[in-house]
Image (cartoon, coloured by chain):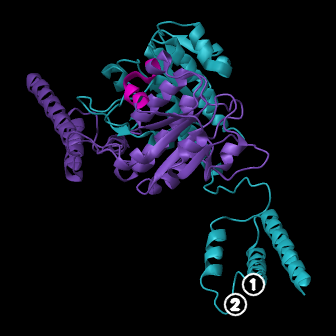
Chain colours: A cyan, B purple
Amino acid sequence: MTEPAFLSNARIVLINTSHPGNIGAVARAMKNMGISDLCLVAPQQYPHERAVWRAASAVDILDNATVVETFEEAIADCGLVVGTSARGRRIPWPLVNPRVCAEKIVPELPQHKVALVFGREDRGMTNEELQRCNLHVNIPTSEAYSSLNLGMAVQVLCYELRMAAIADSLTADEMAEWDTRLATNDEVERLFTHLEQTLIDMEFLKPEAPKQLMNRLRRMYSRIRLDDLEVQMMRGILSTTQKWVQKARDNDT
Amino acid sequence: MTEPAFLSNARIVLINTSHPGNIGAVARAMKNMGISDLCLVAPQQYPHERAVWRAASAVDILDNATVVETFEEAIADCGLVVGTSARGRRIPWPLVNPRVCAEKIVPELPQHKVALVFGREDRGMTNEELQRCNLHVNIPTSEAYSSLNLGMAVQVLCYELRMAAIADSLTADEMAEWDTRLATNDEVERLFTHLEQTLIDMEFLKPEAPKQLMNRLRRMYSRIRLDDLEVQMMRGILSTTQKWVQKARDNDT
């Protein structure tokens, strides 16, 4: 899969972060999802060794991060600014969930820079900052505990951005990257015929009273999509079984 | 929004975790998403104060966690076992992405327990462990850096589980929780009429050469979905503007 290049227009903005470890975790989450533009607005402790440690192999994201004094500087060149917000402000904002948010952002990325803005660990974004945003996103959380860690919130949003960016190459087909071709229907049918004959040979299946045996076996194997090597393997086992049955009969006579 | 009760049947299994901080981060990520059943297979350092610290307000998840010696014990009572896997094993597994994974898991949750299994920080799950799983999930990452932090991986999967569990109550409509009703089309039309008359009054709009002014204003305001209070506010501004224009005219005569 080629990297969707326009993700380079997605910027993560962190306002006034207090824990440098969170900045490192954000850098790693971004790089894992192919996003590289990080802007720190007045971080409380930065640079800091805990940021480097938590970034792991994403130290380059920190090295290239921009540090500015004001939120205005961070979003000055952006065509779309998205704020992250908890529910239940006194004046509500239009709120989208992270999936809808990503679906709105990704089509704009080829045209201009888009900022995804995250507020302080303890208080989030101020109303003044939220008013500078064109769109507001909220991660649906359990009412029992709604406060996400900053790095986790960035991870969820960056994951949704990536999912939307690679939507064309995503597949619901779990066999898409299989290493051999799937068996054809005809090959599977011949396997069932071979299986049935073998079961008759070994007198496990009585043709005059077959009951539901073959139906149940068919249903069982149909739940997997057999590949060609698996069909060959099964037929080999059946042939060997038949030989042993034949040999036992020969010995009896 | 009521909590989807059957999420209680979702179990997060961590195998042989080395950093206790990660266990705490996992507990918090779970509780944020309404998932509570945590099972630790032979954790290397546990209990540990870093786990408690990172769990923040999710210490109850740690308190109720089960600690077992073997993977078999962790999944013994589960009807579906899902393993997390990196790409590119020598014998590939059928791999689904986290969204498809959640869509497969959620319909099974009312029936039986489902385990979501995460391997070691450095080596993931062994082939033997992966073979005990019915389904394998992979988080699509950038090729530049594919190794997700354990807590982050759990956060993404739990988020997708929650999104699938609350799918019925999700809406793409960002105005769904607006605090007042949206304006009717008729109210908006009367606003446009009022606006046009005001612009004529102030001789900004010349009825004999209207150009594209009203069309542009219509297009601009149509991009916002005005609510009834906003229409009232705008009409108030227009009426006041008209009064000032009238007053200026009266003074002139």
Residue lying at the far bottom in this picture: please name it: A208
Task: Look at the numbered disc 2 and give the secondary structure of its residue.
Answer: loop
B111 in relation to A240, above or below? above
N-terminal of the pair, mark 1 or mark 2, is 1
Above or below A57: residue B199: below
Residue where numbered disc 2 is placed: A207
- Residue A85: image quadrant is top left
C-alpha distance separating marks 1 and 2: 7 Å
The amino acid on which the numbered mark 2 sits, given as a three-letter code, is Pro
Q: Which residues are magenta?
A: B53-63
Respond whether the residues carrying marks 1 and 2 are from the same subunit.
yes
Q: Position of residue B32 (x, y in %)?
A: 40, 33
Question: Subunit of mark 1?
Answer: A
Q: Is any atom of residue B120 visible in this view?
A: yes
Residue receiving disc 1: A200
Q: Residue at x 44, y 53 (%)?
A: B109
Q: Nearer the viewer, residue A231 or A23?
A: A231
Residue at image position (54%, 31%) is B152
Specify the farthest residue to the front.
A252
Height in image: B250 above or below A204?
A: above
Location of the N terminus of chain A (image quadrant): top right
Q: Quadrant of the C terminus of chain A?
A: bottom right
What residue is drawn where x is 74% and y is 80%? A199
Tell me if A182 is positioned left or right of B164 in this view. Answer: right
Of the pair B39 and B251, the residue shown nearer to us: B39
Q: Nearer the viewer, residue B5 or B33?
A: B5
- In-image side of A213 versus B224 (left or right): right
Q: Quadrant of residue B211?
A: top left
Is the residue A12 above or below the residue A160 in the image?
A: above
